């Protein structure tokens, strides 16, 4: 009987694997047809001198050596990007989990609240950037107007936000928390998949709401937390549009992210060779950080595998 059950589970896993490839096939075909050539072309161009005019000239590893050993702006942009990733990802996870816990209730109109918190995710990044430019405006922005009594009480000047080099990166990170509703939806789906039996059993044992969150909800949410953690890292290393619209990389290159520098190399300097090299360096960095993050998979509790 156990052997039959084992065979059945094995067959189900094979069927799931086949179905997974079937559902992913449109994306895989699109990648092969439309993405494979640009990817391979960028790899070749990273070993060439190519100004987007004429033919590429093979120069070997010169682009990589120039970026790694002779370009201080490269390291500045990389530091800014690491700063963004290692602060924005944990904060985004925390805010998303808190929102999901607050909205995982059965009160009247809860679907409206969930929709409102999710809505920022469908707003254009350009519109969102201009909105937050106004909110964070040092002199007449809404945030500083709300904080005016605090400034007056402590006799301090209003914060400069994105115009202050010491606060500009944090301003963009805080702005990104506005879209925490995207991860919130994933957490909510995971929460509502947790069997009610666990909570009922804990109530019999005398557990309160906080203990249920710590001992049941959060451990059983680790798959979705882990997923959002990995996706947050990958997205964080690609930050560009917000800095391009709001700060143009300033002040003092404080928001001059890696993606921004790559854009400048490609568009403003017409240096496609170094831009391609930067793209592959970013791929390697992201791959290494992601593989290190995947080591945390051993702390993820997958419901249904506890046996």
Image (cartoon, rainbow, N blue to C red):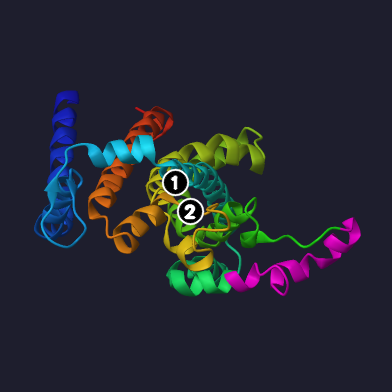
Residue 109 position, x and y percent, is 58, 72
Residue 231 position, x and y percent, is 38, 48
The residue lying at 12 percent from left, 46 percent from top is: 18
Return the residue nearer the eye: 287 or 282.
282
In the picture, the quarter occupied by the N terminus is top left
Q: Decide if residue 60 is on the left or right side of residue 162.
A: left
The residue lying at 84 percent from left, 61 percent from top is: 151
Between tags 2 and 1, which lies in front?
Answer: 1
Q: Which residue is mark 1?
A: 73
Residue 122 among those drawn in magenta: no
Residue 259 position, x and y percent, is 38, 53
Residue 123 seen by the camera: no
Q: Which mark is residue 226?
A: none
Quick one: SS at disc 2? loop
Q: Which residue is mark 2?
A: 256
Residue 111 higher or lower than 155, as above or below: below
- Disc 2 to disc 1, how far (Cα)? 9 Å
Q: Which residues are magenta?
A: 133-155
Return the residue nearer the eye: 18 or 129.
129
Main secondary structure type of the part rendered in magenta:
helix
In the picture, the quarter occupied by the C terminus is top left
Residue 151 among those drawn in magenta: yes
Residue 229 higher or lower than 116, as above or below: above
Residue 154 higher or lower than 144, as above or below: above
The residue lying at 28 percent from left, 48 percent from top is: 279
Q: Give the tally of numbered discs.
A: 2
Return the residue nearer the eye: 143 or 258.
258
Chain-order first, disc 2 or disc 1: 1
């Amino acid at each position: 009987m156990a052997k039959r059950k084992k065979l059945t589970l094995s067959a189900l896993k094979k069927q799931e694997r086949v179905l997974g490839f079937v559902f992913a096939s449109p994306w895989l075909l699109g990648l092969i047809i439309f993405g494979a050539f640009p990817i391979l072309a960028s790899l070749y161009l990273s070993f060439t001198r190519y100004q987007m005019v004429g033919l590429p000239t093979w120069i070997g590893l010169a682009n990589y050596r120039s970026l790694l050993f002779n370009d201080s702006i490269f390291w500045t942009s990389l530091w800014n990007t690491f700063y963004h990733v290692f602060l924005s990802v944990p904060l985004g996870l925390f805010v998303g989990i808190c929102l999901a816990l607050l909205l995982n209730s059965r009160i009247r109109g809860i679907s409206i609240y969930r929709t409102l918190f999710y809505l920022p995710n469908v707003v254009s990044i350009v519109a969102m950037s201009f909105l937050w430019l106004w909110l964070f405006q040092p002199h007449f922005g809404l945030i500083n107007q709300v904080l005016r009594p605090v400034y007056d009480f402590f006799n301090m000047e209003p914060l400069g936000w994105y115009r202050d080099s010491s606060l500009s990166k944090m301003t963009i990170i805080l702005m990104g928390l506005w879209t925490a509703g995207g991860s919130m939806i994933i957490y909510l789906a995971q929460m509502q998949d947790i069997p009610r039996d666990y909570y009922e059993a804990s109530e019999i044992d005398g557990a309160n709401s906080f203990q249920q969150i710590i001992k049941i909800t959060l451990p059983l949410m680790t798959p979705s937390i882990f997923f959002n953690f990995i996706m947050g890292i990958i997205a964080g290393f690609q930050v560009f549009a917000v800095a391009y619209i709001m700060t143009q990389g300033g002040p003092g290159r404080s928001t001059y992210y890696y993606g921004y520098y790559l854009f400048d190399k490609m568009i403003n300097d017409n240096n496609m060779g170094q831009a391609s090299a930067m793209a592959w360096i970013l791929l390697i960095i992201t791959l290494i950080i992601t593989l290190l993050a995947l080591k945390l998979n051993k702390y993820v509790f997958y419901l249904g595998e506890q046996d």
